Amino acid sequence: MEIEVNEQMQHMQENVSEVVEELKEELHHQQQEQAKNSAWLNQVAVSTGIFAALAAIAALQANFLGEEGMVAQIKASDQWAFYQAKSTKIHIEESSATILKSLERTVPPSVTETSNQLEKDKTKISHEAQALEKESHAYLERHQYVAYSVTALQVAISLSAVAALVRRKSLWYVGFGLAALGIGFLFLGNLPVTHVASEAVSETQMVKPAANH
């Protein structure tokens, strides 16, 4: 009997040892999983912070580009109003010359000279206005790109937050893809805008000598 009891006790001890080892392995496995999850959540937090910073920069840039586009458009409108005023003055000068001719009077050279000068001014103003419109279009086009960037980055932030809550890395990867797309749009939106208005003025000044012939 004593031998059987000793064998049973030894068998029980072996079983307990196996259970303990299994529990240790399970705990070790859980600790490893928790460590991995913790490291991944840290990565999600860091990436989300970067996305948020980029979204803030993109929002500021979108506001700047939109304002610059509107300013250029307002300047273009002012130039077209000035162009219209020059056209009205030319019409007045031509009407004066027509009246003098109908009365069989000599048209003063100043009238012709004024008309010619006004025509030159109209050409210059037209070039400047068209250049400003192109500049405005360039700013607003870049504004649109940066607006797309803000949207993509905001969605990436939302997906990263959801991924952390439901522990789904696939959502985080999708968020990374959207963030990359947003960065691409941000790059396109920050391409330099050529100030074509000043170039148009130079070109108009170069054309002036040819207009005198």
Image (cartoon, grey):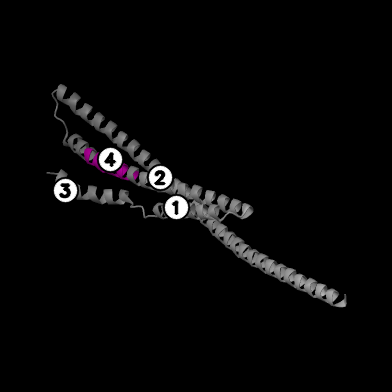
Q: Which mark is residue 172?
A: none
Foreground mark, 3 or 2, reads 2
Q: Amino acid at mark 4?
A: Ser
Q: Residues within 10 Å of mark 4 (few under 14, many from 20)?
A: many
Circle 3 — which element? helix
Q: How far from the left and from the top, in percent, is residue 148?
A: 46, 47
Q: Amino acid at mark 1?
A: Leu
Residue at the top extreme, as displayed: 102
Q: Amino acid at mark 3?
A: Pro
Q: Residues within 10 Å of mark 3 (few under 14, many from 20)?
A: few
Foreground mark, 3 or 4, reads 4
* Residue at the spot of label 4: 126
In the displayed structure image, the side of residue 31 where residue 53 appears, left or right: left
Which residues fall within the magenta stretch?
119-132
Residue in the picture at 29% in, 31% down: 88
Q: Which mark is residue 181?
A: 1
Q: Amino acid at mark 2?
A: Leu
- Rounded to the nearest whole Å, what is the CA distance between mark 1 and mark 4? 39 Å
- Rounded to the nearest whole Å, what is the CA distance between mark 3 and mark 2? 35 Å
Which of the two labelled residues, at mark 1 and mark 2, occupies the earlier sequence position?
2
Along the viewing direction, whichever of 121 and 142 lies nearer the viewer: 142
In the displayed structure image, the side of residue 5 where residue 36 appears, left or right: left
How many marks on residues?
4
